[in-house]
Amino acid sequence: MNPRWVWGLLLVLPRSAAAQADCFPPANSNEAKTLAIFSVPLAYSPLAAPEIVSKMRVRLGIEGSYLPKVSDSTAVPRICRPGKGPENTNLGFAVPRPRVMLLVPGGFAVEASWVPPARVHGVKANLVSLAASYAMRLGSRGSRLAVRVHGTFGKILAPITCDEAALLDPASACHNGTLSEDEYHPNIIGADASFGWSMAGGRLLPYLGGGYNRLQPRFQVHFTNSQGSTDNRRVEVDLDRGVVFAGATWKLANRF
């Protein structure tokens, strides 16, 4: 046996295995930036000014979350799938997220929301978010300070790696394969503080604040190519993000 052939085989095999291995891109990679952009609308941020009630109340609401656009240059993988064109990241969906909040006397509150697994524009999400907060009065002019912890967990299924356009593209590795059913887990936990005050006789309550989010997104590829080979590699990255926000609560009436 030719020794050069043996050495060539030994060099090729690890590279082939590595191509299908799990990937852990650095925080400055395109893969990490894309996953961070996905996390922006999914973080369970506060949607109302800090409030203290004298008796137990339940608040119902709905939040519209829109996924920001990812530029073509950022959507091109550089570490995990080098040489591949932009991923199908701009799915252009807006997810309605119903929210329920229980306020109890003393400034304590808990929140929850659930995005049910209904497929919309090829995207199927099943997400649960939880939060707990405590508000306190500052002075006698209606100013309040609230501290809060939150988390968002679950998964989103979508054809990100190989969409319908990629399956029809002869130059794509997806050509003549199956539509991918890729899985994204946001895994977001965070803490924030908000300061609010009263205006217009207590009907208008502006607030502003900031916080910290720990992002541990996990992305699972699931694609079968034209030769019947299935790609199940995982992409994992851990990120830290500072948060700033502002808003206002406008009381139309006692219950709205």
Image (cartoon, rainbow, N blue to C red):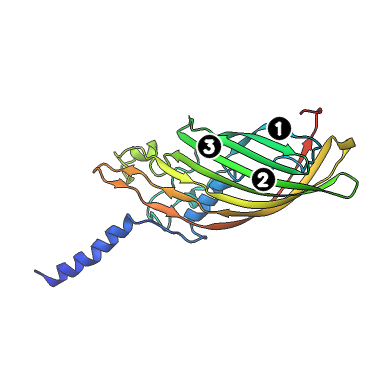
Viewer-nearest residue: 7 or 206: 206
Q: Is disc 1 placed on a helix, strand or loop?
A: strand
- Density class for disc 2 (Cα within 10 Å; few <14, some 14-19, many ≥20) is some
Q: Position of residue 180 (x, y in %)?
A: 37, 40
Instruction: Say which amino acid is labelled 2.
Output: Ala
Q: Earlier in the sequence, mark 2 or mark 1?
A: 1
Q: CA distance from mark 2 to mark 3?
A: 31 Å
* Type of amino acid at the residue the image marks with label 1: Val
Q: Does residue 40 appear to the left or right of 169 in the view shown?
A: right
* Mark 3 lies on residue: 92
Are there few (<14), some (14-19), or many (20+) residues within 10 Å of tag 1? few
Q: How far apart, in angstroms, are the residues tagged by discs 1 and 3? A: 32 Å
Judging by the rendered image, the residue that carries numbered circle 1 is: 58
Q: Is residue 131 above or below residue 242?
A: above
Q: In the drawing, what numbered circle is on residue 132?
A: 2
Q: Amino acid at mark 3?
A: Gly
Disc 2 from disc 1: Cα separation: 14 Å
